[in-house]
Image (cartoon, rainbow, N blue to C red):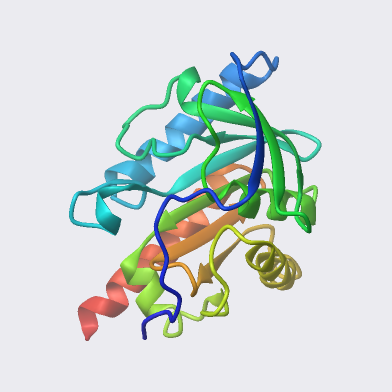
Amino acid sequence: MEARNSEQEGVIKYDLEFRSTKITEPDFEPKLQVLNRWRSVLWRLGLVGQDPLRYGGLGFGNISIRIRGDAFLVSGSQTGHLSFLSTCDCAFVRDFDLARNSLIAEGECRPSSEALSHGALYDLHEGIGAVVHVHSPEIWQGFEQIGLRFTSETIPYGTPEMAFALQTEANALLKMSSSGVVVMRGHHDGVISFGRDLEDATMVLLSAHARAVKMKSRT
């Protein structure tokens, strides 16, 4: 089943107030090490990356980790081709407003186009410490068979509607577990996961991916 939305991958749709500067947050370096550790797993599996045959050759997928309050570190826009992220490949999101579709960030790289969706999940619950967004045709096409929650195919990525829809679905999942996976039906192949930390958020995503791949192999 194809989403009805036509979209262009990687386009930042939110209002961004960005300051180009070196990130100086005290916890930045250790958080970046953790982010790279789990991102490398996703990158090797092709869930995060860049492929000339997919999405017009643009980078896809992003990953973030909470720093303090609702502020978070997120992989930068169009960094999917990189197997390892350095300090200049990330952005620090200081604040955001879901209703106004706006975000304040700084760093040597602008934040991912999905940064507001990450913010929506941090805003939802203080127990969410990390968010992962990947592109998985297997999960996206087989989500019903493996029983995943999803947002409407009429809701495009990078919008307040998507942010609030993700909160609704994630809130339902939080009643049963500290982590979860939501399929973004209005964002081709888009899947987002969350958890207490990056291990939690990545492992629940990889479990869904394994189930989807297994299901696909049976058809």
Rendered view: 118 above or below 160: above
Image coordinates of residue 180 in percent, x first then y, are: 60, 63
Residue at (66, 13) in percent of width and height = 24
Image coordinates of residue 193 in percent, x first then y, are: 55, 57
Residue at (62, 55) in percent of width and height = 117
Nearer to me, 184 or 12:
12
Where on the picture, by quarter, is residue 25?
top right
Identity of the residue furthest to the left in this view: 53
Asked whether, in this view, residue 199 is left or right of residue 85, the answer is right
Q: Quadrant of the N terminus?
A: bottom left
Nearer to me, 188 or 219:
188
Q: Is residue 195 in view?
A: no
Residue at (32, 70) in percent of width and height = 138
Image coordinates of residue 139 in percent, x first then y, are: 39, 70
Image coordinates of residue 30 in percent, x first then y, are: 58, 20
Asked whether, in this view, residue 196 is left or right of residue 88, the answer is right
Asked whether, in this view, residue 197 is left or right of residue 202, the answer is right
Q: Is residue 184 in view?
A: yes
